[in-house]
Each structure stands twice: as C-alpha cells, then as structure tokens.
C-alpha cells in the first residue's frame, strides 16, 4: 500500500476504499455538509448536551439524549475509533446539538478520510498498530476479496457490514488462521479472485433499490 494515496497494490491490480464502498458497507450518507465545527472542552460539551446527569427515558428530550450517546458510541468504536478502543473525542458533540440536522452531515466522507489517514500512519516504520474504522476496512476486504472472508451469517442483509454479525459459531476455525495463511492467499491472487468496480456498482444499485440510506446511517 502506498501511503501517498492509500491504495492497495496487488500483483494483478490496485484498489482503494471508495465513498460508494462506505455507503453500501456501513450505510452512511456520502453527500451533505462537511463534518467540521468549533472545538469545545469535554466539560462544556457535556454541560451543553445535558449528558452529565443520568438519562431516564421519560420524554422526547431524554430519548434524544440517549440516541446522541449511542451515536457517540458508534463514533468511538466504528467510525472514528482510535487505539484506545474505548474513547471518543468530544469535538463531535457540537455536531449533535441540532438533533434533526444530524443526518445532513456527510459522515461517510469523514469516516473514509479518517480511515485513509489511519492507513497512511500505519505505513510508518515505527508504527506497530493501526486504528481507525477497522469494521469498514475488514468488511471492504471481505467484500472485494471474498476468498479472505469468513462465512457471512446473512448474505442479503444491509448494510453489508451486518453480514458478519455473530459469525463466530459458523466460523470457529477462522480465528486460528495465521498471518502466513493470508499472505499466501494474497501472493496467490489471480484474475477473477476479486470483485471489480462493476460488480460492486451493480451490487450497490440493487441494494439502493431495496433500502433507504438516509434511514439507516446510524444503525
């Protein structure tokens, strides 16, 4: 992979994660307002959103606060994860102030940019771990290179990342595959072993006809 452009270079071709991939894998919107805004301290952000107190689901305001907490969890674990594996930056909280306007942001673009930055950092000589939206990266690799993938629990579900929810029982032996095993599979990659852009575009068209991305981006 070249850190300059975050492309993966194989013996037969090269490819990269696209906005279209983000849309069909995570169900995120890729059009809309850029994900940017003012920075706030953690105390100011919590106080502004009323997240310091215990949330009791008694009215619409409390339900919205609960949903915002869930979205922040997704930010920290799926979309914008870091190496801590459990933290999320408070900079995202101001973007959730207008509950009805959350959907207007291009979360898919921000997620892809975060992943590309993480991939570039991972190419450094002194880097020993990778962070970022690894769910996106894994699901993309399993979709583009199906010979690497475990057996999906539900091959027709959308977004595509949900295909591998609760997959451990059917793929018990999968966890014991070694790094050498995957390197050998990639070294033996031949024409026809991967999906090309036309295949993925066709799949995206069929999925878009079945579901609305605007209703599923935060699931």
Image: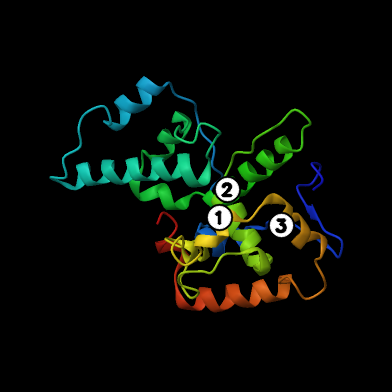
Q: Which residue is mark 1?
A: 175
Which one is in front, 66 or 183? Answer: 183
Comparing labels 2 and 1, the label whose residue is closer to the camera: 1
Identify the mark at residue 181; answer none if there is no mark: 3
**Residue sticking out furthest to the right:** 11
Q: How is the image coloured?
A: rainbow
| Residue in the picture at 53% in, 48% down | 33
Quadrant in which the C terminus appears: bottom left
Local packing at callout 1 (Cα closer than 10 Å; few below 14, some 14-19, many 20+) is: few
Which one is in front, 56 or 9? Answer: 9
Q: Secondary structure at mark 1?
A: helix
| Residue in the picture at 49% in, 61% down | 172
Task: Determine if residue 199 is in view.
Answer: yes
> In the rendered structure, are the residues bearing label 2 and label 1 in contact, judged by CB atoms less than 8 Å apart?
no
Local packing at callout 3 (Cα closer than 10 Å; few below 14, some 14-19, many 20+) is: few
Give the alpha-carbon distance from disc 2 to disc 1, as whole Å. Answer: 17 Å
Which one is in front, 130 or 76? Answer: 130
| Residue 116 in the image, given as x and y percentages of width and height | 68, 44
Mark 2 and mark 1 lie on one chain; the one further toward the N terminus is 2
Give the alpha-carbon distance from disc 3 to disc 1, as whole Å. Answer: 12 Å
Q: Which residue is mark 2?
A: 134
39 to 110, vertically: above or below: above
Classify residue 198 by image quadrant: bottom right
| Residue 28 in the image, given as x and y percentages of width and height | 51, 57
166 to 190, vertically: above or below: above
| Residue in the picture at 46% in, 63% down | 167
| Residue 151 in the image, given as x and y percentages of width and height | 54, 69
Give the alpha-carbon distance from disc 2 to disc 3, as whole Å. Answer: 20 Å
> In the rendered structure, are the residues bearing label 2 and label 3 in contact, judged by CB atoms less than 8 Å apart?
no
| Residue 8 in the image, given as x and y percentages of width and height | 77, 53
């Amino acid at each position: 992979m070249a850190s300059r452009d975050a492309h993966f270079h194989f013996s037969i071709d090269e490819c990269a994660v696209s906005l279209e991939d983000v849309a069909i894998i995570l169900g995120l919107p890729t059009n809309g307002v850029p994900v940017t805004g003012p920075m706030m301290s953690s105390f100011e952000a919590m106080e502004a959103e009323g997240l310091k107190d215990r949330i009791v689901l008694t009215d619409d305001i409390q339900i919205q606060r609960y949903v915002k907490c869930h979205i922040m969890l997704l930010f920290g674990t799926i979309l914008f994860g870091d190496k801590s594996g459990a933290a999320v930056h408070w900079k995202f909280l101001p973007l959730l102030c207008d509950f009805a306007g959350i959907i207007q942001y291009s979360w898919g673009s921000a997620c892809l940019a975060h992943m590309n930055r993480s991939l570039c950092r991972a190419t450094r000589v002194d880097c020993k771990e990778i962070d970022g939206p690894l769910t996106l990266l894994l699901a993309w690799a399993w979709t583009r290179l199906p010979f690497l993938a475990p057996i999906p629990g539900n091959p027709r579900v959308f977004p595509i990342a949900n295909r591998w929810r609760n997959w451990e029982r059917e793929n018990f032996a999968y966890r014991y595959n070694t790094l050498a095993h995957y390197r050998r599979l990639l070294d033996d990659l031949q024409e026809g072993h991967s999906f090309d852009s036309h295949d993925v575009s066709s799949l995206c068209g069929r999925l878009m006809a079945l579901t609305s991305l605007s209703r599923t981006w935060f699931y």
